Image (cartoon, rainbow, N blue to C red):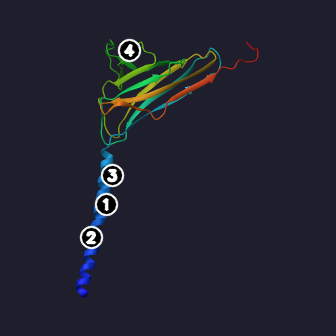
Amino acid sequence: MKKMNEVRQKIVEWQEMNTSYLNEIKSLLSDKKALKDFQVISYFTYSLNLLHKEGNENYCLGSFHIQNVGGRPLTNPYICIKVSSDSPFDFSGKYLYKDSKQKMRLANAWERINDPMDKQEYWLKPVEKNVLNPSETLSFSSFQMKWLPESSYAGSIMGFTYGDEAKDGINSLNQINISGTIIEEGGNE
């Protein structure tokens, strides 16, 4: 009888141990599945030079970064940088046009893929990068926005990331919002 109780106790211990192992395996599998999920983030970094005096040029220097923090690649990435319609900003950056006669291709070059006359939306794709693998970052670097304030001004820049796995687009984590007012000096010209 004592032997039988010892055997039963041993069986219960093994069952508990097996349950513990199975739970650990399930946890590891769910962690591994999370690593296989698609997750891409994008964000702006920028600096401003603002002079709140009429006739002085203000500017913003920025970059737009796409980071693959998931476990699956983003294929055929492209971005949209959207300037608000009421802003005084003049956007420029290092990008080429498809029919550009420029023979020299720059490293990390981007190509504008929408109408060059559109001054509100800039659709860009990297020239040499078709896949953004996990843990990689892709950047549209050193764009500029310039404006000459006349009185009050306000505007925003928004960013979106697209690709084969993100056809509806992914909003950037932040946007650039700039506003200001020119204060006239008391009667001094």
**Tag 1: residue type?**
Glu
Q: Earlier in the sequence, mark 1 or mark 4?
A: 1
For mark 2, what is the residue? 15
**Tag 4: residue type?**
Asp
Query: Local crowd at mark 1 within 10 Å, few (<14), some, or many (≥20)?
Result: few
**Marker disc for residue 84:** none
Q: Earlier in the sequence, mark 4 or mark 2?
A: 2
Q: Nearer the viewer, mark 4 or mark 2?
A: 2
Residue found farthest to the bottom: 1
**Marker disc for residue 31:** 3
**Tag 3: residue type?**
Asp
Q: Which structural element holds mark 1?
A: helix
Image coords of residue 7 (percent x, y)? 23, 80
Q: Is residue 60 left or right of residue 183?
A: left
Q: Earlier in the sequence, mark 3 or mark 1?
A: 1
* Res 39 quadrant in image: top left
Image coords of residue 136 (percent x, y)? 35, 37
Q: Is residue 49 shown to the viewer in this render?
A: no
For mark 1, what is the residue? 24
Query: Local crowd at mark 3 within 10 Å, few (<14), some, or many (≥20)?
Result: few
Q: Quadrant of the N terminus?
A: bottom left
Q: Which structural element holds mark 4?
A: loop
Q: Nearer the viewer, residue 172 or 185?
A: 172
For mark 4, what is the residue? 115
Tag 4–tag 3 contact (CB < 8 Å) = no
Q: CA distance from mark 3 to mark 2?
A: 24 Å
Q: Earlier in the sequence, mark 3 or mark 2?
A: 2
Q: Which structural element holds mark 2?
A: helix
Q: CA distance from mark 1 to mark 4?
A: 55 Å
Image coords of residue 5 (percent x, y)? 26, 83
